[in-house]
C-alpha cells in the first residue's frame, strides 16, 4: 500500500487513490469474466487511471495496489505477461499473425487451494473449455512445444474434434475454440514460409509454460505413460 509520503509526492489524496484502485479491480474482474480469461492490456488499465489524472507515477502505483488487493480479497494474482521473443517466419519476414512485440498485459490467476477453488469458485459449466485447453496444450507439449496446424487437427480428429465442425455439442465452433487459446496466450500462432508455401504452426505461449500448468502436464503425461506400460505388460 502506498505511504502518505508517496501520495504527497504524486499529489493525490488517499481517497482518490482508493477510488482508482477500486475501479481497476472492478475492471479486471469484469474483463476477465467477459473475455473468458483473455489478458487485459496494461494500456486499458492506464486509461482508467489517467482519464482525470496526469501524474506519470500514478498508474504503476495504482496497478500494483490493485494487484495486492485482488490477492488479499479474492485470492487472485494479477500476473503480468510480456512476450519478449520476436516472432518471425523462417524466411526472416515478420509473421502477419502476431506482432513482433506485444504490449504488457495481465491475467488473473487463482492462488486459492485447489479444493477451495473447486468448491466455491470454479464454474462447472465451463469445465469443457478447461478440458479442451489442457488436451491441446498436452498435444503441443508432447510434440516438443511446437506443432503444425495440420498435425494438431489430425491429433484432435482422433478425439472426435474436426476442424470444419462449427456446431460441436460442447465446444460449438471448434476453430474458434482453438483460436481462443491463442487469445488467452496459451498458444502462439505463427505463419511459416516453407518450400511448399506458407503454413501455420502452433507453439506453447507464456501461460502454457507457467510452472503451475507445466507441472500438471508432466504429471498427466506420466500417468498416461504408466497406464500404457501397464496395459502392454498384460499383452
Image (tube, rainbow, N blue to C red):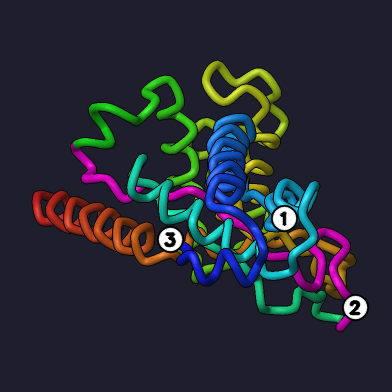
Q: What secondary structure is found at the residue carrying circle 3? A: loop
Q: Residue at x 30, y 56 (%)?
A: 216
Q: 2 or 77, which lies in front?
A: 2
Q: What secondary structure is found at the residue carrying circle 2? A: loop
Please tell me whether mark 2 or mark 3 is closer to you in this view: 3
Q: Quadrant of residue 172?
A: top right
Report the residue marked by disc 2. Answer: 93
Q: Residue 214, how many percent across, how many down?
A: 37, 63
Whole-angstrom CA distance, mark 1 to mark 2, is 32 Å
Question: What range of the chain is rendered magenta?
Answer: 92-115
Mark linked to residue 1: 3
- Looking at the image, the residue that sits furthest to the bottom is 92
Q: Residue 154, how many percent across, how many down?
A: 59, 47
Nearer the N terminus, badge 1 or badge 2? 1
Mark linked to residue 46: 1
Q: 226 or 10, which lies in front?
A: 10
Whole-angstrom CA distance, mark 2 to mark 3, is 45 Å
Please tell me whether mark 3 or mark 1 is closer to you in this view: 3
Q: Residue at x 80, y 72 (%)?
A: 100
Q: What secondary structure is found at the residue carrying circle 1? A: helix
Q: Residue at x 61, y 38 (%)?
A: 27
Magenta stretch holds residue 96: yes
- Looking at the image, the residue that sits furthest to the left is 234
Q: Measured along the vertical axis of the image, is residue 11 above or below residue 120?
A: below
Is residue 117 visible in this depiction of the protein? yes
- Bin the neighbour count of mark 2 within 10 Å (Cα to Cα): few under 14, some 14-19, many 20 and up: few
Query: Of helix, strand and loop, which mostly describes the magenta segment?
Result: loop
Q: Residue at x 72, y 46 (%)?
A: 48
Amino acid at each position: 500500500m502506498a505511504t502518505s509520503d508517496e501520495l504527497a509526492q504524486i499529489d493525490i489524496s488517499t481517497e482518490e487513490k482508493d477510488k482508482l484502485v477500486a475501479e481497476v479491480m472492478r475492471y479486471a474482474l469484469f474483463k476477465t469474466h467477459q473475455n473468458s480469461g483473455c489478458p487485459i492490456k496494461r494500456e486499458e488499465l492506464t486509461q482508467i487511471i489517467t482519464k482525470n489524472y496526469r501524474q506519470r507515477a500514478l498508474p504503476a502505483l495504482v496497478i500494483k495496489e490493485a494487484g495486492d488487493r485482488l490477492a488479499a480479497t479474492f485470492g487472485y494474482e494479477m500476473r503480468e505477461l510480456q512476450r519478449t521473443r520476436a516472432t518471425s517466419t523462417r524466411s526472416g519476414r515478420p509473421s502477419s499473425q502476431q506482432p513482433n512485440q506485444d504490449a504488457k498485459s495481465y491475467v488473473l490467476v487463482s492462488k486459492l487451494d485447489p479444493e477451495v477453488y473447486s468448491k466455491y469458485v470454479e464454474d462447472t459449466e465451463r469445465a469443457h473449455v478447461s478440458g479442451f485447453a489442457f488436451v491441446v496444450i498436452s498435444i503441443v507439449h508432447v510434440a516438443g512445444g511446437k506443432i503444425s496446424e495440420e498435425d494438431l487437427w489430425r491429433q484432435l480428429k482422433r478425439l472426435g474434434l474436426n476442424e470444419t465442425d462449427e456446431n460441436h455439442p460442447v465446444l460449438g465452433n471448434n476453430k474458434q475454440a482453438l483460436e481462443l487459446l491463442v487469445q488467452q496466450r496459451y498458444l502462439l500462432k505463427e505463419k511459416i514460409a516453407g518450400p511448399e508455401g506458407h503454413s501455420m504452426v502452433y507453439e506453447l505461449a507464456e501461460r502454457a509454460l507457467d510452472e503451475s500448468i507445466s507441472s500438471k502436464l508432466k504429471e498427466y503425461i506420466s500417468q498416461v505413460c504408466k497406464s500404457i506400460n501397464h496395459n502392454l505388460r498384460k499383452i
